[in-house]
Image (spheres, grey):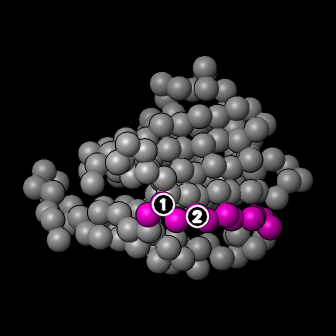
Amino acid sequence: MVENENINTQIEEINLNESLAEVLVSINSLVRDSKAVIHVDFSDFENVSFNKAYIKSIFLNLLTNSIKYAKPDHAPVITIQSRKVNGVKQLIFSDNGLGFDMDKVKDKIFGLYEKFHSNIDSNGIGLYLVYNHITSLGGRIAVESKINEGTTFTISFKY
């Protein structure tokens, strides 16, 4: 186990399937009620060196956002996959939801209390947390989105 001396956050080898399964159990009724279809493909890599609480928070926030911001009368379709690009481990989250106008929100997307939809239970904290979890451990996150087509988050890990 490696300690990140800057913030004293434990870095350990984490199995993505196990962490995702724990999160899915915790939001089982939300997934069931939304009729969400979740495709998971961790065939490029199953383990990553990261903080366990952070990875679960990332899964939780991105999954619940995909469900919360699904298109009306459409079941959310969410794809989570691992990918290696030039030796860098990446996690790709995609959905077919409402999406947002990247030209309008690109500088604010990960800001605290930023909201891009009028959803009643939107508090503008989820993406801020996701961003901070990733960047505090030396990773990066990129986002692509189109209105009414969905959103894709690409997380690149440091380790």
Q: What stretch is highlighted in magenta?
A: 34-45
Q: Residues within 10 Å of mark 1 (few under 14, many from 20)?
A: few
Check contact, mark 2 vs mark 1: CB within 8 A.
yes
Residue plotted at (62% across, 52% down): 65
Q: What element carries label 1?
A: loop
At 58% from the left and 58% from the top, the residue drawn is 80
Can residue 43 be found in the magenta stretch? yes
Q: Type of residue at label 2?
A: Asp
Circle 2 packing at 10 Å, graded few (<14), some (14-19), many (20+), is: some
Q: Residue furthest top?
A: 103
- Residue position marked by numbered label 1 in the rendering: 44
* Residue 112 higher or lower than 21, as above or below: above
Circle on res. 41: 2
Residue 68, given in percent of the width and then of the height, sits at 69, 54
Q: Residue furthest front?
A: 86
Q: Relative to residue 11, is residue 90 drawn left or right?
A: right
Nearer the observer, disc 2 or disc 1?
A: 1
Residue 126 location, x and y as percent? 50, 50
Camera-nearest residue between 47 and 26:
47
* Residue type indicated by callout 1: Asp
